[in-house]
Amino acid sequence: MQITINQKKVTIECSKSSAEEVSADASIFFLEEDSKRINSLAKNIGADLKKEEFNGSFDKSIILPSAGKLRSRYVMMIGLGKKDKITTETMRRAAAIAAKRTVEAKYPKVAINLHGLPEKYTQPVAEGFFLSLYSFDKYKKKREFLLDKITICGEGLQKSIESSIILSESVSFARDLVNTPASDRTPKIFADVARKECKKYNLRFRAIGKNEAGKTGLNAFLAVARGSSHDPFFLILEWNPRAKRKIALVGKGITFDSGGLDIKPADSMLGMHGDVEGAAVVLGTMTAAARSKLPLHIIGIMPLCENMPSGSSYKPGDIIRAYNGKTIEVINTDAEGRVVLADALAYAEKKYKPEAIIDIATLTGACVIALGHEAAGLMGNNEKLMEKISAASSSTDERVWQLPLWDDYRELVKSDVAEVRNTGKERGAAGPITGAAFLEAFVNKTPWAHLDIAGVTLYERNKYYMPRGSTGWGIRLLHRLLSDWK
Ligand code: BES
Ligand code: MN
Ligand code: ZN
């Protein structure tokens, strides 16, 4: 098998042998705190390892020369911490530590030992390892990336490793797309990249341009797009259109959010090329679905445009008639994500009649205030769907936290002059929820859920397998949700 990491092809081999018998630069072992295994491994290579040097506590690691006793040159021990505290997330993070040490030491070949670990840890280890090797460096002098071959040692690995490769590549692809500066990744460029991906993985692709969008009545989408000199594109991707069961994914694709006429201050504007994350996550999920041949009809909708101030921008006070006929009073042009999603949600429901619609969007700064970078806000009109999302979330450790959508919140987005207003009536109150209450007005009866991912992407610093910038949060979760769909 092969995985592309930082534009380089890396060979992945599954092996039933023990990592001690594989020829590599380093053999990597994951070890519980105070496990006997630590000493026996050390003894094997004639090392006198003291408890103070390494005892297997989490976040600790050590590299010892194998002194010709093994086929690999070094043994790398990675601490997992106390046995009863180890989770799939511990494994992903531990694997990230191993990957970082591998890169620092410039080992071209490593063997990862999974013998003796529960099978449910195979995929987390592989994902954690692959995902943490990502780096956004296409604008930098070529960095040396020597890693060439990873041998994974254990039983029954094939399927989990294949999934890990597909998911890691999809996540890295989304990260690259989002991290690319807005001037180099306009709606047109995003659409072209998406078209290419669709060709590669056999997905149906359609791009609705400005004129056709006008004829179709995607007026809310076009209102936001109007201020920019870059033309908008409304993308519709489909996987497996013959399948009976249909799910629609909708991703916010603001390729740059300046705020529009309600322009953002400099501090808040920096990083707003990342406002396209939702769309990139939908695209990544679609290619992952295609590559793993999911037996569902999946529709991916991505409204792509820039939110810019100019003589042709939409204005505070404007009243727009959305695709479903509802009118929107524009209170603040910086609440643009919900305006483009209004059309996208209504379009998904009317055209495809899916059994569920899930939208994913960097929608509100208030969600970052509420949950920090640790969880996405989850809201919706259907408890069952939200439970499914929570279940998928527990297995991929991309945390979600449900926020309520009570009628009193719905009141806050009612407008005096239109059906809805694009910000809440009580200034700043319940930001993520009023965002969701607005979106809800554009779905009729279809079970719908909304993920506010403003906090779980666009990191300021690296954190284990999540890099600075775009994290690609949600691709693994949505893929799990769709894989388990019943
Ligand atoms: N794209 C922003 C939300 C955002 C903020 C994402 C920080 C990632 C990090 C969104 O379009 C926005 O500007 N929201 C406003 C809404 C307000 C005007 C009701 C916000 O959060 O201030
Ligand atoms: Mn905005
Ligand atoms: Zn935005």
Image (cartoon, grey):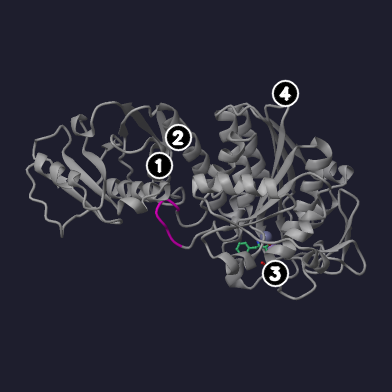
Mark 3 or mark 4, which is nearer the start of the sequence? Answer: 4
* As drawn, 272 above or below 41: below
* Magenta-drawn segment: 461-466
Q: Residue at x 30, y 56 (%)?
A: 59
Ligand 2 found in image quarter: bottom right
Q: Which kind of residue does numbered mark 3 sit on?
A: Ala
Where is residue 444 drawn, in percent x and y?
Answer: 84, 48
What is the CA distance from the residue labelled 1 to the residue labelled 4? 33 Å
Q: Which kind of residue does numbered mark 4 sit on?
A: Arg
What is the CA distance from the residue labelled 3 to the residue labelled 2? 39 Å
Residue count near mark 3 (Cα–Cα under 10 Å), binned few <14, some 14–19, many ≥20:
some
The kind of secondary structure element at disc 4 is: loop
Where is residue 423 drawn, in percent x and y?
Answer: 77, 67
The kind of secondary structure element at disc 3 is: loop
Residue beneath label 4, please?
242
Residue count near mark 1 (Cα–Cα under 10 Å), binned few <14, some 14–19, many ≥20:
many
Q: Residue at x 56, y 39 (%)?
A: 480
Q: For residue 464: magenta?
A: yes
Where is residue 140 drawn, in percent x and y?
Answer: 42, 52
The kind of secondary structure element at disc 2 is: helix
